[in-house]
Image: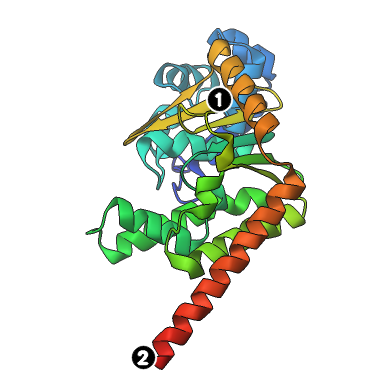
Amino acid sequence: MPQPKRLDPSQSPRALYGAELRHQREAAGLSQDELGALMFVSGSFIGQLEAGIRRMQPEYAKMADEILKTDGFFVRNLEAAMKSPYEHHFADVVEFEGLAQGIKDWAPDLVPGLLQTAGYTRAVVRAYDPVLAEDVVEERVASRLARARVFDNPAMPRYWVILDEIVVRRQVGGPKAMAEQLRHIATLANRNRIIVQVLPLSEGAHAGLDGLFKMMTFDDAPPLVYVQGVQTGRLLDDPAVVTRCTLTYDLLGAVALSPTASLALIEQAAEEYEDAHRTRSEDRDLA
């Protein structure tokens, strides 16, 4: 008798978990609606579990094992399916980014993680924890850069970011790192892969003063909003919260520079950082 399969957490565990649910459902000759009825949920809910959009809860894992006669596979592998290199409060967000049809980021302080370059991320991680071991820093840099794989798909997700101008002006990692970071954003915009707007400092008070948030929409699931604090974060699907964040984003977009003007500002700032880096390098050579 073959040994029960186990999940490898390094290979997109939630995707493997969902694929196994789909495989076992189909092997049992059940549709998503039929399995959903047996588990007292909708067929679309089963589809979201299979796609990895929904997290499998222990009670559903137990029911899936009993109905599909999978010898405890889903309960046994539930913990492995939830493992992630990211902080607990952020692990689900990374999974949802890869499943989203559309993503909108409001960035009042820093370049969003999906757009960060290695030098920029390294500076952010170091600033947050100055005594962190070098290997841990590099692990965090690699994990953050891995999130950018969502842009490998030329069509999905549709990504729109509004940056406060302070994000462009704050020198994170020095002029070289900033130039590389802004050139990276400009490259994605010039490739028509992302939409970027800059909210000018001259705007003063604006609708986004409460802090950063991320909105994600899906083909077959309700939209989600992610909000973040110190060492914490929350994914919310409350329609009232989604409606308020949608309005806030619309208000921010209305007062931000156009995508064309924003790109020009970003490229001009990148050029200024490049000039500053050259000047600094020349001064060191003369010293």
Q: Secondary structure at mark 2?
A: loop
Mark positioned earlier in the residue sequence (1 or 2): 1
Residue 25 appears in view: no
Dot 1: within a 10 Å radius of its alpha carbon, few (fewer than 14), some, or many (20 or more) residues?
Answer: some
Q: Residue at x 36, y 55 (%)?
A: 125
User: Which three-letter amino acid code belongs to the residue tagged 1?
Assistant: Ala
Residue 162 occupies quadrant = top right
Towards the viewer: 122 or 21: 122
In the rendered image, residue 78, in percent from the top left (x then y), is placed at 41, 32
The numbered mark at residue 207 is 1
User: Which three-letter amino acid code belongs to the residue tagged 2?
Assistant: Ala
In the rendered image, residue 146, in percent from the top left (x then y), is placed at 52, 54
The numbered mark at residue 287 is 2
How far is mark 1 from mark 2, CA to CA? Answer: 48 Å
Say whether residue 168 is left or right of residue 197.
left
Q: Residue at x 57, y 22 (%)?
A: 245
Q: Residue at x 67, y 57 (%)?
A: 186
Say whether residue 155 is left or right of residue 134.
right
Residue projecting furthest to the bottom: 286
Q: Secondary structure at mark 1?
A: loop
Residue projecting furthest to the left: 131
Towards the viewer: 174 or 118: 174
- Figure check: 18 above or below 176: above
- Figure check: 9 above or below 90: below
